[in-house]
Amino acid sequence: MPVYHKLGQLPRKRHIAFRKPDGGIYNEQLVGNEGFTGPASLLYHIYPPTTIKSIRRIRDTAYQADPDQTLKHRHFKTAQIPEGGSPTLDRVPLLFNDDCAMLFVRPTVADTHFYRNAQADEVVYVSQGTGILESQFGDLPYREGDYLVIHRGIMHRFKMDPVPHRLLIIESRGYVRTPTRYRNDYGQIVEGAPYSERDFRIPTELRTYDEKGDFPIIVKQHNGLNELILDHHPFDVVGWDGMFYPWAFNIHDFEPIVGRIHQPPPVHQTFQGDGFVICSFCPRPYDFDPEAVPAPYNHSNVDSDEVLYYASSEFMSRKGIEYGSITLHPDGIPHGPHPGRAEASIGAKETNELAVMMDTFRPLKTAREALPIEDPKYQFSWIEAGAGFNPPTS
Ligand SMILES: [Fe+2]
């Protein structure tokens, strides 16, 4: 990603008069990043996107860190986060640094407002739920296992089906993209990468609303939420083209790379940000050398904090770790398999694990809101859990 895409009506060339049926001209808007040089799209609106009737700041969202900075492995149980609220306004911050943040929400109330994050790209991992991600670029249906990549500035709304939702949100200061090594000099995904362009889903149905009225738009900027009232429906786009739009990739479309002996976590890399990466641990055959130890070797994360989200509702047999668990293994303390796990893994043929990993290159802070869902015993689980504790595998 990205590839060039277009939907709806477009003029013959950019920046020329594009006439409406009534003789007026459509309102052209460039949406993109890095000024006028990064990935961008051109949108054609019925109404100007600038006709704002009022603005107010709703609340601050600056993340507050746990004052206890003791270095330790940590475990948080997102299943203990109560259901409720909005998919965009009621997210619980868990971990953060200056490059990225991880939040979680189990929303039950569909938004009536539109939302855009002006200070971060968002990767929304749909751990549970189905619906449609609506945007000015068209409808993008989503389902369980989807990563929804919503670049900064893209106005959108979650049209949730009436089913339980669990959304893991990763905010990124930098542009979220496929890893450089997965792309050739011409931008195409190379053979040997764990996915191809065919696996990416792009909005394919454009809905155009010609409605006047009061339409609230919530914009996250300057570590706060701001409400703008627009005097028309913001999804008034009749056509767009370019390389900047929301897109989806399902974790089950990630093709795991396996080897005769243990492959290190970078083979699971899925996305790249500035200062962090996102990896997908998917069901796969284990290492096939008879003497191979499929469980990971102990490792020290030099210059890397490692966060794992356990994403499978069918993967409940692991003692100590549950669906929705998040573990943080910080730089400065080694981690590895729990006692007995390395020996027990020899000869195992496959794993059904499903996990999303965020590796950050600068230390993470724990948000205060994560403390009520923390399992305080986790840091000693290598001593106390014994062979029964089945561990993170990264
Ligand atoms: Fe690890």
Image (tube, helix red, strand yellow):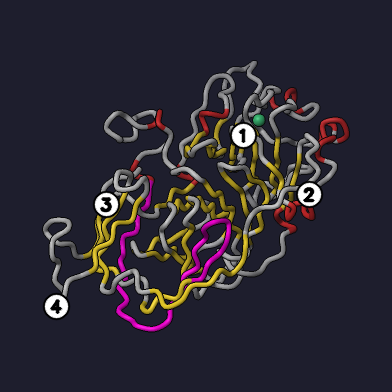
Q: Do the residues labelled 1 and 3 touch (CB within 8 Å)?
A: no
On the rendered image, what quadrant is the N terminus found in? Answer: top left
Residue underneath mark 2: 374
Residue 376 visible within the image: yes
Amino acid under label 3?
A: Gly
Query: Which sits earlier in the primary sequence, circle 2 or circle 3?
Result: 3
Relative placement, left or right, of 380 versus 254 is right
Q: Name the residue under label 4.
A: 21
Q: Is mark 3 on a helix, strand or loop?
A: strand
Pointer 2 local density, CA inside 10 Å: few below 14, some 14–19, many at least 20: some
The type of residue carrying mark 2 is Glu
What is the x, y in percent for residue 262? 59, 22
> Is the distance from the Cβ of mark 2 to the nearest ligand 1 atom less than 8 Å?
no
Residue at screen point 69% across, 36% down: 392
| Magenta stretch, residue numbers | 200-227
Badge 3 crowding class, 10 Å Cα cut-off, few under 14, some 14 to 19, many 20 or more, is some
- Rounded to the nearest angstrom, the CA distance separating label 4 from label 2 is 59 Å
Q: Which residue corresponds to mark 1?
A: 362
User: Helix or strand or loop: what does disc 1 sit on?
Assistant: loop
Q: How far from the left and from the top, in percent, is residue 243?
A: 30, 49
- Alpha-carbon neighbours of circle 1 within 10 Å: few (<14), some, or many (≥20)? some
Give the Cα separation between the discs numbered 1 and 4.
Answer: 54 Å
Farthest residue to the right: give it. 384
Residue at the image position 61 percent from the left and 49 percent from the top: 102
- Whether label 2 touches label 3, CB < 8 Å: no
- Classify residue 348 by image quadrant: top right
Which quadrant of the figure has residue 176? top left
Q: Do the residues labelled 1 and 2 touch (CB within 8 Å)?
A: no
Q: Residue furthest bottom?
A: 213
Cα separation between marks 4 and 3: 24 Å
The residue at the point 70 percent across, 33 percent down is 330
